[in-house]
Image (cartoon, coloured by chain):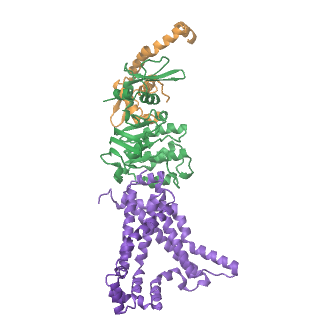
Amino acid sequence: MNTDIFNFKRFARYFKTDVTEACSNYGLSLLVMSSMPITIAVITGVLNVLTSGQWESSGLTSRILLFLLFFIITCITAPSKLYGSLTDKKEGTAFILIPASRLEKYLSMLIICCILVPVLFLDIYLALDFLVCAIDPTLASSDATLLSFFHNIRERLLHMGTTIDWNEMSQFIKHSESLVKPWMYIDDMMSISLAFLLGAITFKKSKVSKTIGCLIVISIVLSMIATPLITRGSHLTAEMIEKMEMTGVTGIDDLIEILPGQFWALNHLVLIDTINDILWIVGLLTGIWFRLKNMKH
Amino acid sequence: MEFNQNKSIYLQIADSISEKIVSGELKEGDRILSVRELGAELGVNPNTAMRSYEKLTGEGIIYNQRGIGYFVAEGARLIALSDMRKEFMEKELPDILRRMNLLEISPEDIFKENI
Amino acid sequence: MIRINQLGFNYGNNVVLKDITLNLEEGRIYGLLGENGVGKTTLLTILSGLKPAMNGTVEIDGRNPFKREPSLLSSIFYLPDEVLPKRRSAMAFARDMGQYWEKFSLEKFSGIMDVFETDANQRMDQMSLGQLKKAYISFALACNTDYLFMDEPTNGLDIPSKAQFRKAISKYTFETATIVISTHQARDLEAIIDPIIILDRKSVLLNASTAQISEKLYFDYGTQIDPDALYSELIPGGCIQVTPNVSGTESKVNIEALFNTVMKNKETIREMFKQ
């Protein structure tokens, strides 16, 4: 390969520099965010001691919600803390002029933002949560850890589906089974990181809020385009209703059987979601690439 | 080095080297600073230092031994001395005489006081 | 070899460079002069690949710097006017970043830091502006690149450092390097820059070595103002004036007087220096 495009040795060197910079700019913040299980345990414990005189820890549900909150905050803020300075003249100039190829700088950025930061966050957070649960007598059961919760999430959801016994919604349950495939979450998370990375290197100020604003606008536009596509044919014609009355529809399965092709969107929920995610990711990756290519100072 | 206002820098550098040769500070056969070193010492462009050396080489005051450096040439002192004398007579003395004339100083006045 | 052909650049309606044609040769220390806002910095940033040429072409060793190919980036060093105070010692910074420039020498870096009497082990974000600038100048010179572009390098340097800077430039730059230094502090760099380039918004007004300049123009310090003088200015003890060189005597180029002469006589100067 042309060494002006990619050279492994140079990439390794650049990645090392980039990680070093990332540690000095964001290492502490990441540590604070991922140490939240301890902070939460201490704060809830102390508050409970003060109010009821008894040490009590926060339950699984609240810990799940807090975990999601901190995880999303991390995914949203990390890119601008790591690479937001590239829109600054001095920092951006130094970045552009480092003799490494654009592809190398790009890959390093993506690995740090989309893999390193989330993986480190998850590892530390879940490990500390595990530790807190092990130490805290009120949380003695191992089922109470976030780790075991996420480990069993698929079974739990399926179990929830069967216990509710929505026979007529069996089709949905089939879908929800596929929805629990882990990569579906990984690509959602990646899109979030990528979107905020693009925002971080595009907007000069209030990077996070401007990115959120843009995402809202884009979602509105996209849903305006996508709604007629997805609901295509799902409005019922008199003919359909007649057909349904004749056969006696009792559930969504019957409906799909009677009207093949009409509920294609429902049938292909996973496919549509996957395509949607892939389009987002490809679009964002392209956007970041061109933003780097056309960055001027 | 403070440069005189009027004269081209490279000429002034060449003059100062000639002066060192005449005064005996630099002896024939001595190695002199490289172009880079001289440039660095005086804080001037290396190309300017190069021009000074080219001028002195042309006059036979110094010579370049390839790969080693510049040396004061055999007979450099005499050449430098006659060059400097000529310059003194042609350029500096007329100015001095003009000033002496203006200030009504006779040559005797100077020699009476200084000797 | 740098070839700039009919280069143009503007920020919106504000034209900063127009029709710039220049060839910059190796082994020279070019001084880039011009009034405020004529795009000296813009020219340097285009040469370094930070901005694209809007009109015309710029080629360094036959390549377009805006492509930012690592092999070309590693033969260029650009020192901006404002530099970044990293959260680490200058030495650690140099050791790390130096790896990207093949011919970088850490000994040279500490050597130049010594010339500047600046402690390389001090953290960059705790340095004064002048110290930080000196750390970056030392790094820039230690990279030993073929092309070195410096934007106002003496800004922020104290008086002794300016002399040290001149010494460092003539001692430590690569013999075959092409160096371009933009400055409006002409006096700081008077003896070090040669050739001299003077820009204005419409074109290159002058691009000549001091030898060529002193061949064409005579810089005279006297008491009598010559009626043919292209420029004259009263100074304590007399005046400095610039006249066409008719006698063939070589005088010392005074950059400030030269700059003012060129600004006052754009067309005459252009004719005079036409090759």
Residue at the farthest front position: A238
Colour seen for chain B: orange
Q: Nearer the viewer, residue B32 or B110?
A: B110
Q: In this view, does C178 lie above or below A49?
A: above
Q: In which quarter of the image is residue C271?
A: top left
Residue A34 higher or lower than B91, as above or below: below
The answer to whether residue A294 is above or below residue C166 is: below
| One can see residue C149 in this view | yes
Q: Which of A202 and C155 is in front in this view?
A: A202
Which chain is painted in purple? A
Q: How many marks?
A: 0
Query: Which image quarter: residue A223?
Result: bottom left
Residue C226 position within the rendered picture, expressed as x and y whole percent measured from the top left: 44, 18
Q: Where is residue A50 in the image (x, y as percent from the top left)?
A: 70, 77
Q: In which quarter of the image is residue C57?
A: top left
Looking at the image, residue B85 lies above or below residue A217? above
The residue sitting at 34% across, 33% down in the picture is B65
For the N terminus of chain A, the image quarter is bottom left
In the rendered image, residue A255, in percent from the top left (x then y), is placed at 36, 87
Q: Where is residue A203 in the image (x, y as percent from the top left)?
A: 47, 58
User: In the rendered view, does B84 fall on the left or right side of C274?
Assistant: right
Residue closest to the eye, B8 or A265:
A265
Please indicate, yes or no, whether residue B56 appears anywhere in the rendered image: no
Chain C: what color?
green
